[in-house]
């Protein structure tokens, strides 16, 4: 879901929903080949994450933890707009397991190929086109975060 920073600034987290609806009606993309360690999976689209939340409060991968040494890879195999709506609703509820079309894998490295016109994005921003390779960095990044409000 690619979109301009201007849209994100003006609509905030609703910009994600606007782009999701646009993508639902888009002509189906070419199949993706997702290489996970020793196996290859196919899907219509995929999300690779090491944090459970996306766009703030959207819990899309409940088992993902930033301190883990693996990603969660969500692979979607919807057949048209209605399946995509159902899958997005399962994500919105934070329950990808509700949809049999969403498969979740854990891996420390993923390689995704597909049509050369297929685009990639990182945290809602354009990141080039396929193929992409994503791996866990060998060194951790130290973060300073505020304490939660009580």
Image: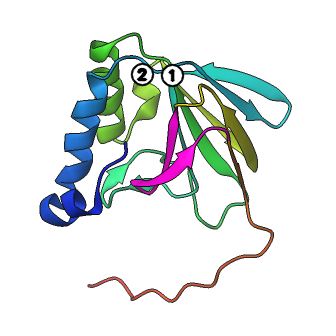
Using the image, determine if residue 68 lies above or below residue 83: below
Residue behind mark 1: 44
**Horizontal side, residue 40 vs residue 2: left or right:** right
Here the colouring is rainbow
Q: Is there CB contact under 8 Å for labels 2 and 1?
A: no
Numbered tag placed on residue 119 in the rendering: none
Q: Which range of residues does the magenta coloring cover?
A: 118-131
Using the image, determine if residue 68 lies above or below residue 31: below
Of marks 2 and 1, the one in the foreground: 1
**Closer-to-camera residue (41/10):** 10
**Horizontal side, residue 119 vs residue 138: left or right:** left
- Magenta span contains residue 123: yes
Residue behind mark 2: 99
Q: Secondary structure at mark 1?
A: loop
Give the quadrant of the C terminus: bottom left
The outermost residue toward the front is: 117
**Closer-to-camera residue (7/109):** 7
* Quadrant assignment, res 50: bottom right
**Closer-to-camera residue (36/125):** 125
User: Going 72% across and 42% down the picture, which residue do you hit?
Assistant: 110
Q: Secondary structure at mark 2?
A: loop
**Horizontal side, residue 134 vs residue 6: left or right:** right
Q: Residues within 10 Å of mark 2 (few under 14, many from 20)?
A: some
């Amino acid at each position: 879901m690619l979109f301009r920073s201007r849209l994100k600034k003006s609509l905030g987290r609703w910009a994600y929903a606007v782009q999701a609806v646009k993508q639902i009606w888009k002509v189906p993309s070419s199949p993706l080949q997702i290489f996970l360690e020793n196996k290859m999976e196919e899907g219509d689209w995929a999300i690779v994450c090491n944090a459970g939340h996306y766009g703030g409060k959207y819990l899309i991968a409940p088992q993902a933890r930033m301190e883990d040494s693996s990603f969660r890879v969500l692979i979607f195999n919807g057949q048209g707009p209605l399946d995509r709506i159902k899958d997005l609703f399962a994500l919105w509820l934070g329950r990808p397991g509700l949809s049999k079309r969403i498969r979740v894998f854990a891996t420390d490295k993923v390689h995704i190929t597909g049509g050369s016109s297929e685009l990639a994005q990182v945290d809602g921003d354009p990141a080039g086109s396929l193929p992409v390779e994503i791996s866990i960095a060998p060194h951790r990044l130290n973060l300073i975060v505020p304490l939660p409000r009580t």
